[in-house]
Image: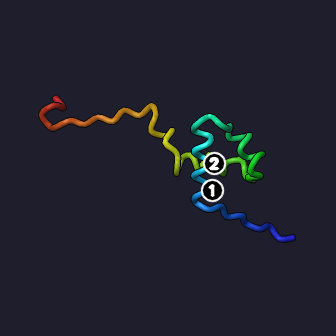
């Protein structure tokens, strides 16, 4: 059998990412529950769709005069 590419809908990807962010699943458990292959598939979804990437970043808004 040929190596078939599985495509997941954006709604499904968002659902999985949301469940992981809420603590309902870990990445590993979501892979098992939803039968998602690929060791980095969900991690890529989290980077693209998730909100966790905003944590720990400092956003600084300043005017030119405030820089000095």
Callout 2: helix, strand or loop? helix
Mark 2 Cα within 10 Å, few/some/many (few <14, many 20+)? Answer: many
Q: Is residue 63 left or right of residue 61?
A: left
Residue 7 placement: quadrant = bottom right
The residue furthest bottom is 2
x, y (%) of residue 31? 73, 46
Quadrant holding the C terminus = top left
The residue furthest left is 65
Quadrant holding the N terminus = bottom right
Q: Which mark is residue 26?
A: none
Q: State how many labels appear.
A: 2
Q: Specify how the rendered protein is coloured.
A: rainbow
Mark 1 Cα within 10 Å, few/some/many (few <14, many 20+)? Answer: few
Q: Residue at x 73, y 52 (%)?
A: 36
The residue furthest top is 68
Q: Is residue 9 left or right of residue 1?
A: left
x, y (%) of residue 48? 52, 51
Q: Is residue 34 left or right of residue 59?
A: right
Q: Residue at x 62, y 40 (%)?
A: 20
x, y (%) of residue 40? 67, 48
Foreground residue among 28 and 66:
28
The CA span between labels 2 and 1 is: 6 Å
Asked if the residue under mark 1 is in contact with the one under mark 2, i.e. CB atoms within 8 Å, the reply is yes
Q: Residue at x 57, y 38 (%)?
A: 21
The residue tagged 1 is 12
Q: Is residue 20 left or right of residue 37?
A: left
The residue tagged 2 is 16
Foreground residue among 9 and 48:
9
Callout 1: helix, strand or loop? helix
Q: Residue at x 60, y 50 (%)?
A: 15
């Amino acid at each position: 059998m040929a190596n078939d590419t599985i495509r997941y809908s954006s709604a499904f990807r968002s659902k999985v990412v949301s469940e992981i962010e809420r603590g309902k699943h870990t990445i590993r458990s979501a892979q098992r529950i939803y039968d998602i292959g690929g060791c980095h598939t969900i991690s890529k979804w989290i980077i693209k769709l998730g909100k966790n990437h905003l944590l720990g970043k400092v956003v600084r808004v300043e005017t030119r005069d405030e820089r000095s």
